[in-house]
Amino acid sequence: MEITERLSKETARDYAYRTLRENIIKLKLAPGSMVSENDLALEMGLSRTPTREALIELSKSQIVDVLPQKGSYITKIDYSMVDEARFMRLVLERGIVEILCDTATEEELKTLRYSVSLQEFYLGHGMDDKFFKEDNAFHRRLFEMANKMQSYKLMNSMMIHFDRVRMMRLQTSREVNELLTDHKVIVEAIAQRNVTEAVERMTLHLTRYKVDAELIRKNHPDYFID
């Protein structure tokens, strides 16, 4: 696993949850793999209790199967779950950009443009992990600016299914420049109060993963439910 430092005021359970979630998304904990509660706890420097609690919480999103007396299983990728997560995100984020076309301030647009510039730097220097993180931060900021963080939290519980495919797309296809271009177009459409363009581009942006589905499956056949 990839272990990061525990954040200030982060509980052991929250740290375990964040660490496991990030490693599942990054495929460090591979789809279809069995994991040991004891081994995970040892690697994170935690006791078994917060580790078990984190695994149970992840199981609520159907990304982990906790098997009594046997261990835990990182679920394989089920495209029906990916599609449901994408559907939720698509409905919410199209609504978010509609709101921002009416409410976004110059300071907020400046923040979004700075995020895009960071993404461009990371992508240009082959820093895929940092690009992925800033990509997520960009979308979170849209919800923050629209004052819809409860909607974001609801959506985020399902996004782990979608995010695994997004990470595989980054690792498999070098056409990720399209994602950066989408962000640029979305920001400028918001700046111009062009609701139609903002919504259409967000729709395109959140459906791009389908283009690479066959290639992703070919490269990682063991990661998917048949």
Image: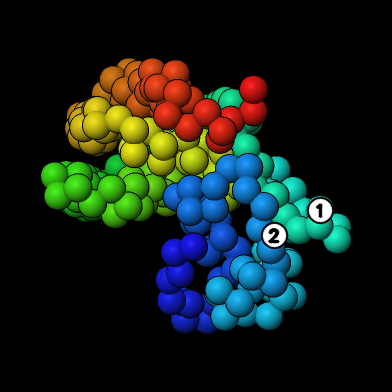
Nearer to us: label 1 or label 2? 1
x%, y% of residue 101? 32, 32
38 to 171, vertically: above or below: below
**142 with respect to 43 (left or right):** left
In depth, the one of 87 and 98 nearer the eye is: 87
Amino acid type shown at disc 2: Leu
Mark 1 or 2 closer to N-term? 2
The answer to whether residue 88 of the structure is visible from this angle is: no
Q: Which residue is mark 1?
A: 67
Residue 11: image x %, image y %?
Answer: 60, 77
What residue sits 86% from the left and 61% below the top? Answer: 69
Q: Which mark is residue 55?
A: 2
With respect to residue 141, does 94 lie above or below?
above
Q: Residues within 10 Å of mark 2 (few under 14, many from 20)?
A: many
Q: Which mark is residue 201?
A: none
Q: Nearer the viewer, residue 47 or 180?
A: 47
Q: Residue at x 48, y 32 (%)?
A: 220
Q: Secondary structure at mark 1?
A: strand
